[in-house]
Amino acid sequence: MYKFKGKEYPCCASLTMGIENSLPVNVKINGSPLDVSKEYTVLTSDYLANGGDSMFFFKDPVRRNAVGIKLRDAILEFMVEQQEKNIKITSELDHRIYVDR
């Protein structure tokens, strides 16, 4: 979960998958195989939700809830919170998504 202005929002950290021959394989949500009969929630930017960067599959969702948070504001708030707590921001590859070449 990501916290922003006192509210919690889910993150994509629960998604793992591979790409083989340009197709998704071994797609898992929270460690369980993707269930195509289930409805999942996706958090993305307005730009992508409106079809930007060829994300046309977001243009006709089952339901759309705007949270009113700009991505840059969420990033800046996170960085300020980390700095206030003296927490160094780091990164590492977690291999949630892999491409078989």
Image (cartoon, grey):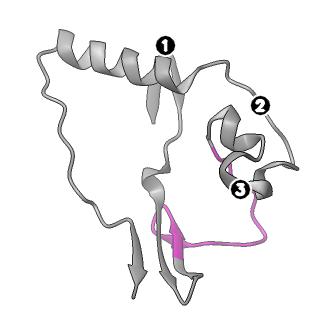
Horizontal and vertical percent for residue 13?
42, 52
Residue 73 located within the stretch drawn in magenta: no
Residue 16 against residue 64 in the figure, above or below: below
Q: Which residues are magenta?
A: 27-42
Residue at 71% in and 54% down: 55
- Marks 1 and 2, how far apart at CA: 18 Å
Residue 98, image quadrant: bottom left
Residue at 66% in and 50% down: 53
Q: Amino acid at mark 2?
A: Asn
Callouts 1 and 2 close, C-beta under 8 Å: no
Residue at 77% in and 51% down: 58
What is the secondary structure assignment of the residue under circle 2? loop
Residue at 68% in and 36% down: 47
User: Callout 2 environment at 10 Å: few (<14), some (14 to 19), or many (20+)?
Assistant: few
Q: Earlier in the sequence, mark 3 or mark 1?
A: 1
**Majority SS type along the magenta span:** loop
Horizontal and vertical percent for residue 73?
48, 17
Mark number displayed over residue 89: none
Mark number displayed over residue 6: 1
* Mark in the foreground, 3 or 2: 3
Q: Amino acid at mark 3?
A: Ser
* Residue under pointer 3: 54
What is the secondary structure assignment of the residue under circle 1? loop
Question: Which quarter of the rendering shows the N terminus?
Answer: top left
- Marks 3 and 1, how far apart at CA: 32 Å
* Residue under pointer 2: 65
